[in-house]
Amino acid sequence: MEIQTETPVKKPKRLTSVVWNHFERVRKAEACYAVCVHCQKKLSGSSNSGTTHLRNHLMRCLKRSNFDVSQILAAKRKRKDEPVTIATVGYDEVQRKDENVIPIAYHKFDQESKVDGTINLGSVKFDQERSRVDLARMIMLHDYPPSMVEHVGFKIFVKNLQPMFEVLTTGAIESDCLTIYAKERQKVFDVVRNLHGRISLAVGFWSSPENVDYLSLTANYIDDSWKLQRKILNFLTLDSSQTEDAISELLIKCLMDWDVDQKLFSLTLDDCFRYDNLAYRIKNWLAENRPVLDHGELFDIRCASHLVKSLLEDSMESIKNVIEKIRESVRFVKSSLATHGKFDEFAQQAGINTEKCLSLDNQMRWNSTYLMLESVLEYKSAFFLLQEHDASYTAYLSDEEWQRVGSVTSFIKLLVEVINVFSHSQSKYPTSNVFFPEICDVHIQLIDYCKNPDEFISSLATDMKIKFDKYWNKSGLGLAIAAILDPRFKMKLVEYYYKQIYDTEAPERIREVSEGISNLFNEYSVDLGGSVDDVAGKGGSGLIGTSNAAQDRLRGFDKFLNETSNQQSGGSDLDKYLEEPVFPRNYDFNILNWWKVHTPRYPILSTMVRDILGVPVSTLTADLAFSPGGRVIDNHLRSVDPDIRQALICGQDWLRMEPEDTNASGLSVVPLAIELT
């Protein structure tokens, strides 16, 4: 007789064991059977038989869907009698803090509503399209490879989690990512188009082990709320045959596609010593359509961290042989407990009292090498005693080598501290005002080292000074102006450093900086309406250079009118700002908040400040600055189509920076702290 024709048993009482979720109890004549719903095998189902044999069968049943009975039993033991609440939560909501979630409430599960371990949630319905969007956004946001959707483990997980979900192919999920990219790009386009101020662009160069080069273009600006923003606009794959001229044409096309050519304030390039022609061509192209502020003096900016990294690399290279001997010395001390103990005795005899411990460095991290050098120099006297009393120690340093490594390490210490300041300022992305004093300290140290009586040190410093001067000639004025616009410093900081750097030439150099910021302010004054009262009435929201000013033959008259009006009215925004006392220095000072509050007092100057403080003076993270290598693209991104690569990288940046809002799935997006260089 077929099992289907057998009459189900009318249960005299509720079957309390969760095992019965996988068996149907049927009666045949006077006997009771438990029929497995997975494989249809009949087992004894009488009340005297218990359920142990049923659990054992489930553990061996090949047709059940990876169901862990032990987990069911554990969940049954932990289940409580009070009502249970759940919430439908998207992938991006797991990071949300201090936010109330309105749950969907339901009472304790009824055994009769369960089939094969599933839970009936009543009105909650599965949405395939929503899940597709959520999956694509997850892949973009967390930098997962799109091909993960075809991994066996992922398919098993998704099918067990939601059997109704239609698992996608790699091509389908890439298509979804492109759709999200297009929608998010329009949002960024609208933000940039409606921005009242200017933007500055950072150009980053990437590489891969296959010798393919890439280029990223990132917009930097201060928004209407005085928050510093960064949004990546493009991630392009370069052809190996492309010259600087071809790359400049590519960048110009990107500027036109984003419609930001009229809003461009400056261009920051990674490398301090290359791409001069690239910056020159873009500046000339811009000048054909509108005047370039201050004759383009502030347009071509180079990465400060790249300069410091280059000097750090030169310093390490100059003593690389000594560094290797130091590594051998540390290995020797740590080679055995006996040797280490003997070395500690020598340290005590030499009167060395330090908390630093000897340790080998990570050779791919220059800050790690610096810590090794610093600790070894603390134990210099102990190494001398080790050399005298242990003939097996052969990696010792000569007096001259100790002297040179001490001098170079002193300079390396300054460079490491400078990079740390660039990377660990109060904000995630430091404004341009923080760089001037750090770069000036490096400048002063190089001048002193050039005068060192040790020819080795002076020669090294002279070579590095040549590099530094090339950077300083391009970016020094911009750094000084940014520092002046910090109310804690104003002109006083420029005067303080320039007297140390230029000595008798300091007054002339200070005058050049003063004229530079005055000329720039006058251009802003002309373009914003010519008078403080007019700009104040506009709320300071005018945009410089959006009109066809290049065709205006009376711009000279506007400048003359502005200058004479300022003289008659008793001074400009800039004059009032510079004449007032400096703001007290404190560690909690937020320059953007200060200017936001003082915008009504300095309407023209505050507009200029927004553009200057938004310039990306550094484009490298500390990890890149302390590493011999450059930016290397992730492995899974190298194998995808260039359009998909750009969509994934740009989409990740836009989604993580997205304010809390409603996305296509109806879920809130919470920004995550993911760094993309």
Image (spheres, rainbow, N blue to C red):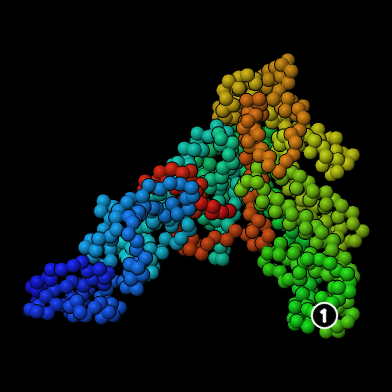
- Horizontal side of residue 26 vs 440, given as left or right: left
Q: Quadrant of the N terminus?
A: bottom left
* Residue at the spot 76% in from the left edge and 71% down from the top edge: 358
Q: Is residue 41 visible to the viewer in this orientation of the structure?
A: no
As displayed, is residue 226 above or below residue 471? above
As displayed, is residue 126 above or below residue 570? below
Q: Which residue is mark 1?
A: 342
At which x and y percent is residue 62?
Answer: 27, 78
Occupied quadrant, residue 225: top right
Residue at the limit of the structure toward the top, as seen here:
568
* Residue at the spot 77% in from the left edge and 61% down from the top edge: 315
* Residue at the spot 68% in from the left edge and 50% down from the top edge: 422
Q: Amino acid at mark 1?
A: Lys
At which x and y percent is residue 369?
Answer: 73, 66
At which x and y percent is residue 117?
Answer: 28, 66
Q: Is residue 672 visible to the viewer in this orientation of the structure?
A: yes
Q: Nearer the viewer, residue 593 or 545?
A: 593
- Horizontal side of residue 177 vs 437, given as left or right: left
At which x and y percent is residue 274?
Answer: 67, 52
Give the number of callouts. 1
- Pointer 1 local density, CA inside 10 Å: few below 14, some 14–19, many at least 20: some
Assign a secondary structure to mark 1: helix
Occupied quadrant, residue 404: bottom right
- Horizontal side of residue 348 vs 337, given as left or right: right
* Residue at the spot 43% in from the left edge and 43% down from the top edge: 661
- Horizontal side of residue 219 vs 41, given as left or right: right
